[in-house]
Amino acid sequence: MDGSKNLALKVICAMICSEKPPKRKEKKRKWVKDWISTRGQQGLSVLQRELEMNDKTGFRELLRMTAEDFDFLLGKVKHLITKQDTKMRLAIPPGERMSLTLRFLATGESFKSLRFHYRVGTSTISQIVVETCAALYQVLKEDFLKVL
């Protein structure tokens, strides 16, 4: 009797051990995180627009240039840094691209830090900074850079 109970326990243990655990469903990753999707209402670009209208000194402290200089530069590169909206998402506007790049150049702030201020992903920021700097160089090199 004792031997048959022992055998039964071994069989039950073997059956339990051989069963595969149920597969866990992986959490679906969102294409855009919730905190990034509120960029139009809460990002630094909202503050920038407020400062441009109400506090010229604050605007200058934010981007290290006047609103007039910002608009001048934006007018020169806007056609080069404008992206097209798609059915899936809205493109980041050229003014926000320029602002993000100028903030990076003026402060040296890390991309990881800027992503929280502008509510843009880190990889997107790195792409924007490179593209905008290339556009600025392209339009300003004739007037402001002396080639030896």
Image (cartoon, rainbow, N blue to C red):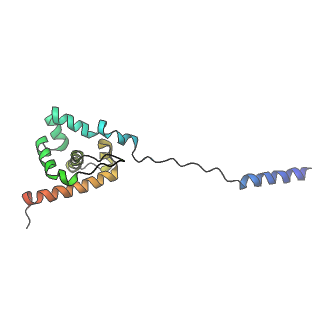
Estimate the x, y position of residue 128 in percent, counting from the top left: 27, 53
* Residue at image location 43% in from the left, 46% down from the top: 30
Question: Against 19, is 58 above or below?
Answer: above
Residue 146, quarter of picture: bottom left
Estimate the x, y position of residue 52 in percent, counting from the top left: 16, 36
Residue that protrudes farthest toward the front in the picture: 87
Residue that protrudes farthest toward the top in the picture: 54
Residue 141, quarter of picture: bottom left
Residue that protrudes farthest toward the bottom in the picture: 148
Estimate the x, y position of residue 47 in percent, counting from the top left: 24, 36
Left or right position of 12 against 60: right
* Residue at image location 24% in from the left, 56% down from the top: 131
Residue closest to the eye, 138 or 113: 138
Residue closest to the eye, 94 or 11: 94
Estimate the x, y position of residue 22 in percent, counting from the top left: 64, 50
Residue that protrudes farthest toward the right in the picture: 1
Left or right position of 95 against 20: left
* Residue at image location 18% in from the left, 52% down from the top: 79
Q: Quarter holding the C terminus?
A: bottom left
